[in-house]
Amino acid sequence: MQRIKTIAQLRDLLRPQRERQLGLVPTMGSLHEGHLSLIRQAAAECEQVVVSVFVNPLQFGPDEDLDRYPRNLERDCQLAEEAGADLVFAPGVEEMYPGEGKTTVRVAGLTDRLCGASRPGHFDGVATVVSKLFHIVEPDRAYFGQKDAQQAAVIQQMVRDLNLPVQIITCPTVREENGLALSSRNVYLTPEEKRQATTLYQTLREATREREAGRLCQAEEAVQFIRERLEQTAGLSIDYVEVLSYPGLEPLERLDDSPSIAAVAVYLGSTRLIDNVIWPKRREEDVPHPDEIQNPPSYRN
């Protein structure tokens, strides 16, 4: 596997390979099994795989964890190679943003809610750096995780709007055995906070079962259901709980009317965690008859 630090060198290496199917896995490093699952899928579907490792300053707010974000390039390169990467592109900030940049990519609408509302400017930074990576690498496919569902929707919209010749592949969230979604920021959690964090996915699963059983039919009901259960966890502070259409991220009333996302963001100590589940549109024949839901089953978290 080759390790590349400059754009010019990367382009020189990739140009003769353009007839080969090229996959890109954009990351900020601190690779975990979630990232590795993306690399493996890219390696299975593409003839050449580039993994970018770049902690993008544009997507961090002034009070966020840019300076302490975990970095270990040697480990990342080893893991990426073992997972099937052919190249790791690890540029410095000056290589990606030379001089005073005056251009920002902004996707309107989709970035106004969820993490976009909580972290103003975050998705401008994401869209800008991903757009740059697409132009630098020119991949046929790019791989993103469902844990960052809003990010995936934003990138999909950007690709459509700008007619970028890249297919966006969204892969399932990878979780620990207790259900906690893998994240580079999980290293910030204490053992007790990590135990408490399992409430996120447990609650989302419970809400999914309630919806499937026909006991949650309105988006507002689902939001209240999720919020009430999260509020029972000591030490957990809610940033947001929302149920929206997906991938449009528009408000909706009935959960059966369109595919939807139930998304949460919370703080445990100083660590911000996100999670979500995607609910498909319900067909009329899938909705339980009232007689079928008089005796609800008992559930275990």
Image (cartoon, helix red, strand yellow):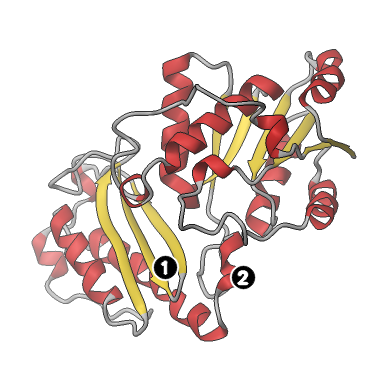
Measured along the vertical axis of the image, is residue 35 above or below residue 214?
Answer: above
The image position of residue 231, as x and y in percent, is 26, 77
In the rendered image, which quarter is residue 52 located in?
top right
Relative to 165, does residue 295 appear above or below in the rendering? below
- In the depicted structure, whether residue 57 falls above or below residue 156: below
Q: Could you tell whether 143 is left or right of 268 in the image?
A: right
Quadrant housing the N terminus: top right
Q: Is residue 217 above or below residue 44?
A: below
Identity of the residue furthest to the right in this view:
1
For the question of whether residue 76 can be seen, the reply is: yes
Q: Nearer the viewer, residue 189 or 218?
A: 189
**Residue at the extreme front:** 100
- Judge the density around disc 1: few (<14), some (14-19), many (≥20) Cα neighbours within 10 Å: many
Residue type, label 2: Val
Q: Which mark is residue 7?
A: none
- Quarter of the image with the C terminus is bottom left
Residue 288 coordinates in the image, percent (x, y): 18, 57
The residue under label 2 is 187
Judge whether residue 138 can be spotted in this image.
no
Mark 2, residues whose alpha carbon is within 10 Å: few (<14), some, or many (≥20)? some
Q: Which residue is mark 1?
A: 201
Which residue is located at x 64 percent, y 46 percent? 55
Q: Can you give x and y, in whole percent of width and height, for residue 274 in the image? A: 43, 59
Badges 1 and 2: C-beta atoms under 8 Å apart?
A: no
Q: Which corner quadrant of the image does residue 134 belong to?
A: top right
- Nearer the observer, disc 1 or disc 2? 2
What x and y, as percent, mark residue 236? 36, 77
Q: Residue at x 19, y 43 (%)?
A: 251
For badge 1, the amino acid type reads Tyr
Secondary structure type for disc 2? helix
Mark 1 vs mark 2, CA separation in Å:
18 Å
